[in-house]
Amino acid sequence: MISKEIALTQPSEMWHVSLKNKDGTPVRCRSNGQCKTYKNTPDRYCLPVKHGMYVHSYIDDDNGWEWCLPDRWEIEKFWRQPD
């Protein structure tokens, strides 16, 4: 899970917990800019990422549970969204 503290360190690579590439490896992305934080809502964050050649996206407080660091992927690969 990518939390706000992890996102602020701008990790170089993150792996998706459940999505896989055609060869069976997890979908990977890399940070593409500075993590944005909010003054009014301190728990929120937004980290721009890039995966593939043309796909740009964000990891934020809503979908941070879907991504993890490569060294934690074996532990978190069966992680499901918290209720």
Image (cartoon, helix red, strand yellow):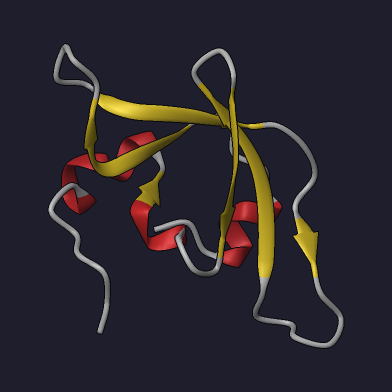
Q: Name the outermost residue toward the front.
A: 54
Above or below — where is 62 with respect to 73?
A: below
Q: Left or right: where does residue 7 sit relative to residue 40? A: left
Above or below — where is 54 with respect to 13?
A: above
Determine which quarter of the picture holds residue 71: top left
At 67% from the left and 50% from the top, the residue drawn is 47
Out of 17 and 6, give the one closest to the viewer. Answer: 17
Determine which quarter of the picture holds residue 4: bottom right
Above or below — where is 73 with respect to 75?
A: above
Q: Position of residue 20 (x, y in %)?
A: 21, 29
Q: Position of residue 35 (x, y in %)?
A: 75, 52
Q: Position of residue 60 (x, y in %)?
A: 58, 61
Determine which quarter of the picture holds residue 49: top right
At 16% from the left and 12% from the top, the residue drawn is 23
- Number of callouts in the render? 0
Above or below — where is 21 with respect to 63?
A: above
Q: Name the outermost residue toward the right.
A: 39
Which quadrant does the C terminus fall into?
A: bottom left
Which quadrant does the N terminus fall into?
A: bottom left
Q: Left or right: where does residue 72 sit relative to residue 5? A: left
At 18% from the left and 41% from the top, the residue drawn is 74
Q: Position of residue 41 (x, y in %)?
A: 75, 86
